[in-house]
Image (cartoon, rainbow, N blue to C red):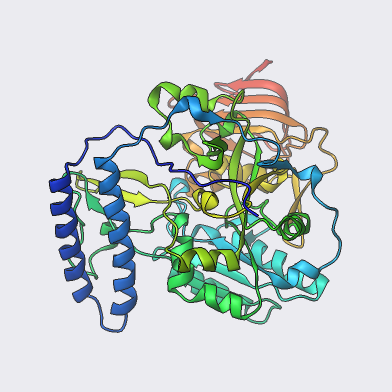
Amino acid sequence: MTLFKTASFRRFRHRKAVRPNERSALAKSTQNDLSRLVRTADPAVRKAFDVEMQSFSKLHARYLAEKENREQLNWDRIKSPNDKQVIPYSHLPQITGPEGLSKLAVLKVNGGLGTSMGISGAKSALEVKDGLTFLDLIVQQVEHLNTTHKVDVPLILMTSFNTHDDTLRIIKKYVSQRISITTFNQSRYPRIWKETLQPCPKYASDDKKHWYPPGHGDLYESLVHTGVLDRLLAEGKEYLFVSNSDNLGAVVDQRILQHMIDSDAEFLMEVTDKTKADVKGGTLIEYDSSIRLLEIAQVPADHVDDFKSVRKFKIFNTNNLWINLRALKRIMDGGGIDLDIIINPKMTDNGQAVIQLETAAGAAIKHFNNAHGINVPRSRFLPVKSCSDLLLIKSDIYSLQNGRLHMSESRMFGSVPVIKLGDHFKKITDFQPRFKKIPNIIDLDHLTVTGDVHFGRGITLRGTVIVVANEGQRIDIPDGCVLENRLVSGNLNMTEL
């Protein structure tokens, strides 16, 4: 049964239109360039590379068509989702049995490098808690699930050309554990020059700087092209739980799985309530009687503040997705999924403007029958995007059990403290030496640190703490220091807040 109709809905951006004759010439020129690229590929991988370039060619053609026929988003037709389109987690069934787990597979999007934190390799190899990496925790979670319920839930890692080799090296240490791990490499697409809209690379072997992984929306095409989708179906798997590898709250939830089975939903998106930190996150909306994912890139400039407000848009997408694999097979065999195009502008090292055409996995919600959102607790969204996030995860706020993070019972409030670390803490190589040991923050509400600040051992932070080292100053918070509702500046000058 289909609850939501399909509507035409595309990304809105102010950009110069492409005339029909110009578009035809561009498309033909691009196709010729891509054909030449394919001929330069190693014969051993040429067939797979050709498939990738054909997929990119379709994406590029859609991009040109949208530039020619710009469809503006009608803001007045956007509505907040109704009670059937977003269901509270508290309404889900209470499940203890393992029946649905035998048909489940878990997929982690594992293509990120963590460049914003100064990480050069796969981000999932970063130690985040008690000496364990993202991947260590993920493996522990799935292994515990299998052992406890006597099932065989496989773990699938979607890597990118940036992280594939690192990931293969890392997972060798899990070979003796009770878990089946599969890796597959998502597509590698060519960047295009902003001025000409033509592919940057001339050869398949050209430097990495000319290529990019096209976002997690590539999940669906890559599952098909690599044969992983057919293999999962052949193994009797019917449901796929997808999440980002850096979201430590994204663990398998049997209540959500059972709801998916009971409701015949082909696609579920986990959303959670917005805070001030989430104002740019994509949200579910009703548009022309259909449920859709709306992201900030689609919003007209004069409505950006409206989008960021929590009055109308109270929830955001966690990118925890539940997908019916049989439905995905039907859709992909029937012509595939056209996802809204995200235009990601970049600059090369020598200052040349390029464009990456990307897609988001959540936008596929419009293609599935009975698709809807589940408003989940905030605990299911614990991403580590910055060193400020990392400090929170490493602290005494959380403990680990079978790879899962649990908030300490000693924490008086259900929410976590707000932590804002300045530029001196931005890179992981700067962050680590600034803490002899992570402070005790179980009673912390807010922490702001700017400038050259170093923390000793056994430090306790409570309430609101602000530490400001001015240019040319260094502040060392001594061992055993207790800061409660304090502003620290200069040579350890302390002011009560």
Determine whether 422 is above or below 122 in the image: above
Which residue is found at the position 43% from the left and 27% from the top?
A: 472
Vertical arrangement, residue 276 with respect to residue 385, above or below: above
Give the quarter of the figure containing the N terminus: bottom right
Check the image and name the residue furthest to the top: 496
Answer yes or no: is residue 415 visible.
yes
For the image, the number of numbered tags is 0
> In the visual, does 84 lie left or right of 55?
right
Instruction: Give the quadrant of the C terminus.
Output: top right
- Tell me if residue 159 can be seen: no
Residue at x 48%, y 38% (from the top left corner): 295
- 324 or 424: nearer the viewer: 324
Q: Nearer the viewer, residue 289 or 167?
A: 289
Q: Position of residue 211 (x, y in %)?
A: 30, 59
- The percent coordinates of residue 145 (x first, y second) are 76, 68
What percent of the width, then of the height, locates residue 441?
73, 37
Residue 45 rendering spot, x and y as whole percentages: 32, 79
Q: Quadrant of residue 259?
A: bottom right
Residue situated in front as seen by the camera: 118 or 58: 58
Question: Which quadrant holds residue 245?
Answer: bottom right
Residue at 57 percent across and 53 percent down: it is 246
Residue 424 lies, with reference to residue 303, above or below; the image says below
